[in-house]
Amino acid sequence: MRRSSTSSGHSVNAARTLWVRVGLIAMLAVSVSAQRAPATGVRTLANVLQLHELLISPASDAVFNASTDPPADDKGWTAVRNQALVLAESGNLLMVGSRVRDNDNWMKMSRALVDAAALAATAAEKKDAKALEAAADPITTACMDCHRPYRDGGRQMGAPPR
Ligand code: HEC
């Protein structure tokens, strides 16, 4: 082995060491900046069941009640409109983050809830008792259409079969 090849081997090693150091420093810089970067974007916390407990069940109860027993005054209509909006927006929340079960049917069923609840919101905005009554059916359909595949494994809504 000739001396010159040994010394060039040394310099190659030195260069490698240098690049490894540069690489490590770069990685460190990236990880530090990642830690410093402020958290952004959506962070979902409630699961599908909790969304029901928090929003979907109480809001749909209020809308269903008003669909058969319409509000007597402006305050009542506003309250129903707000509950219909809560119900519609909860459909949007079903389409976000950890709640999403798939990117196909789940999204369609959630969107159907938004659209059905929007009918009720519009009816309440107009203080239109007939339109509010008519909005109850599409809402019920939206609930059932999603429960059949995603909750009940094909079973119909209502009391469990005996
Ligand atoms: C996009 C799908 C979807 C829509 C729309 C939907 N649900 Fe659900 N629902 C579910 C799933 C999934 C569960 C089961 C959640 C679990 O147990 O993790 C559930 C559970 C429930 C439960 C049982 C909760 C409990 O305490 O066991 C009720 C009641 C319910 N839904 C009512 C409704 C009503 C009323 C509507 C319409 C206003 C509705 N849901 C709309 C998917 C949906």
Image (tube, rainbow, N blue to C red):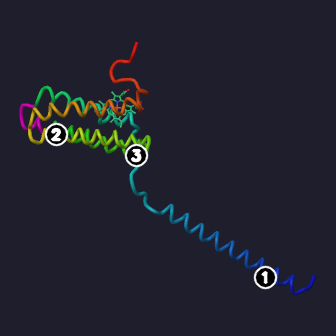
Q: Residues within 10 Å of mark 3 (few under 14, many from 20)?
A: few
Left or right position of 122 against 141: left
Is disc 1 in contact with disc 3, using a CB cutoff of under 8 Å?
A: no
Q: Nearer the viewer, mark 2 or mark 3?
A: 2
Distance in Å between CA atoms under marks 2 and 1: 76 Å
Work out whether mark 1 precedes mark 3 in sequence or the reverse, and give the earlier one. Answer: 1
Q: Nearer the viewer, residue 143 or 17?
A: 143
**Residue that mark 1 sits on:** 11
Left or right position of 3 against 8: right
Residue stretch rendered in magenta on the structure:
71-79
Labelled disc at residue 44? 3
Residue at 14% x, 34% y is 132
Labelled disc at residue 81? 2
Is disc 2 in contact with disc 1, using a CB cutoff of under 8 Å?
A: no
Position of residue 47 measured from the top left corner of the image (x, y, whole percent): 41, 38
Position of residue 4 measured from the top left corner of the image (x, y, whole percent): 87, 87
Please state which amino acid type lies under the numbered disc 3.
Thr
**Extreme residue toward the top, this view:** 162
Distance in Å between CA atoms under marks 1 and 3: 53 Å
Secondary structure at badge 1 equals: helix
Please state which amino acid type lies under the numbered disc 1.
Ser
The answer as to whether callout 2 falls within 8 Å of ligand 1 is no
Position of residue 37 measured from the top left corner of the image (x, y, whole percent): 46, 63
Q: Main secondary structure of the magenta part?
A: helix
Please state which amino acid type lies under the numbered disc 2.
Arg
Q: Is residue 111 above or below residue 38?
A: above
Work out whether mark 2 precedes mark 1 in sequence or the reverse, and give the earlier one. Answer: 1
The quarter of the rendering in which ligand 1 is drawn is top left
Q: Nearer the viewer, mark 2 or mark 1?
A: 2
Secondary structure at badge 3 equals: loop
